[in-house]
Image: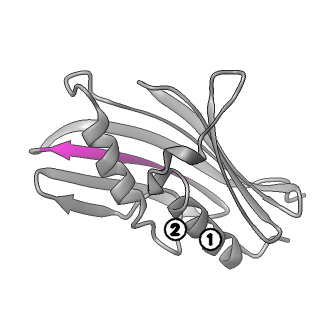
C-alpha cells in the first residue's frame, strides 16, 4: 500500500518543479502533439501530460518503483474575451506554487493578487478527489478548470 503522506510530499515537490515553475525547457513535445513535463526523485516519478492551448486537457500520473499509483485528469480554459491568455496562466502558475501540503491537487483554496483572484473548491482526499478551480479578473470569471483523481491499482 502506498504511503499517502509521502505521495503528498512528492506531489508538492514535483508540481512546484514542473508546470508551476514555468520552466519551458522541461517540456517534451510528444509525437501525438501533446506536451509532457517529468520530475523524478528516488523511486518516484511524476508525468504531467497535456493537450492544448485553449481549451486544454491532460493528466498527471505518479509512479512508485515503476508502478502507477496516482492519477489526476483535468480540463480547463481561459475565457475567449481574454487575449492573449498568458497573464491568466502566469497567475495560475503562481497559485499552483502555493499548493497545499495535505491536499496537493491544484492550488490553495484562495489567492489574491491585485485584480486577480484564484478560487479552488474540492472534496475528498489524495485517495479519491474532485474539484474545480477558477480565476476572476476584477470580479469576473475568466478561467475555469475541472479535475478529478486519486490512487490507482490498489486491489
The quarter of the image holding the N terminus is: bottom right
The quadrant where residue 155 appears: bottom right
Q: Which mark is residue 8?
A: 1
Residue that numbered label 2 is attached to: 103
Instruction: State the image coordinates of residue 78 (x, y, percent, origin top left).
Output: 32, 31
Q: Secondary structure at mark 1?
A: helix
Per the rendered image, the range of residues in magenta is 130-137
* Residue drawn 27% across the image and 45% down it: 135
Predominant SS of the magenta segment: strand
Q: Answer left or right for 68 relative to 123.
A: right
* Residue drawn 38% across the image and 52% down it: 93
Vertically, is 88 above or below 2? above
Depth check, front residue: 75 or 90 = 90
Nearer the observer, disc 2 or disc 1? 1
| Tag count | 2
The quadrant where residue 59 appears: top right
Amino acid at each position: 500500500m502506498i504511503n499517502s503522506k509521502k505521495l503528498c510530499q512528492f506531489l508538492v515537490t514535483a508540481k512546484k518543479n514542473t508546470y508551476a515553475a514555468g520552466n519551458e525547457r522541461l517540456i517534451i513535445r510528444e509525437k501525438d502533439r501533446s506536451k509532457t513535463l517529468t520530475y523524478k526523485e528516488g523511486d518516484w516519478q511524476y508525468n504531467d501530460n497535456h493537450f492544448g492551448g485553449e481549451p486544454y486537457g491532460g493528466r498527471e500520473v505518479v509512479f512508485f518503483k515503476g508502478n502507477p499509483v496516482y492519477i489526476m485528469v483535468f480540463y480547463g480554459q481561459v475565457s475567449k474575451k481574454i487575449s492573449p491568455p498568458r497573464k491568466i496562466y502566469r497567475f495560475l502558475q503562481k497559485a499552483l506554487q502555493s499548493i497545499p501540503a495535505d491536499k496537493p491537487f491544484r492550488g490553495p483554496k484562495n489567492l489574491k493578487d491585485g485584480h486577480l483572484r484564484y478560487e479552488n473548491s474540492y472534496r475528498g482526499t489524495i485517495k479519491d478527489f474532485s474539484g474545480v478551480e477558477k480565476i476572476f479578473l476584477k470580479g469576473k470569471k475568466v478561467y475555469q478548470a475541472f479535475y478529478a483523481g486519486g490512487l490507482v491499482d490498489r486491489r
